[in-house]
Image (cartoon, rainbow, N blue to C red):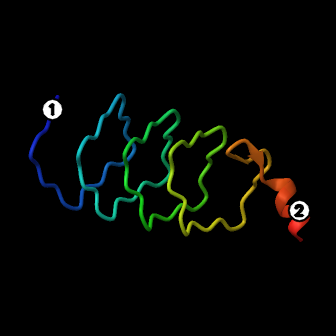
């Protein structure tokens, strides 16, 4: 099914399953995703400026060609975190 040139406001999808969904060239202002399983989701050319992530599992996620300007990380488990191949945890421990 394809839906083109649409405008929806205040939609709630609760207790359902969506498989093989592709969202292309869509504005989702103030989108909220809660208690969702997005395992193996792919995000390409996505603007997440000023997005907030709370209690999110990014284990084994891969990021490439990402703008992290002015990004803040607080209360995070960074075990094994690498940026450009460099382990970050030892660097932060040495900084203390």
Residue shown at 84%/58% (left/top)?
91
Identify the residue position indicated by label 2 in the image.
93
Question: Across the whole image, how many numbered discs are drawn on residues?
Answer: 2
Residue 74 picture quarter = bottom right
Quarter occupied by the N terminus: top left
Q: Position of residue 73 (x, y in %)?
A: 65, 65
Q: Position of residue 26 (x, y in %)?
A: 23, 49
In this image, 56 relative to 31: left or right?
right
Q: Position of residue 14 (x, y in %)?
A: 36, 48
Location of residue 34 with respect to 63 vertically, above or below? below
Identify the residue position indicated by label 1 in the image.
2
Q: Position of residue 16 (x, y in %)?
A: 37, 39
In this image, 88 relative to 35: left or right?
right
Quarter occupied by the C terminus: bottom right
Residue shown at 35%/34% (left/top)?
18
Secondary structure under the numbered disc 2 in the rendered image:
helix
Q: Residues within 10 Å of mark 1 (few under 14, many from 20)?
A: few
């Amino acid at each position: 099914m394809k839906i083109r040139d649409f405008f929806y406001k205040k939609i709630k999808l609760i207790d359902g399953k969506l498989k093989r969904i592709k969202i292309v060239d869509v504005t989702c202002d103030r989108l909220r995703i809660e208690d969702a399983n997005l395992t193996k989701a792919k995000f390409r050319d996505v603007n997440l400026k000023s997005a907030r992530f709370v209690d999110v599992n990014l284990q084994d996620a891969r990021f490439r060609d990402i703008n992290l300007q002015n990004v803040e990380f607080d209360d995070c488990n960074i075990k094994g975190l690498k940026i450009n191949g460099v382990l970050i945890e030892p660097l932060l421990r040495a900084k203390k």
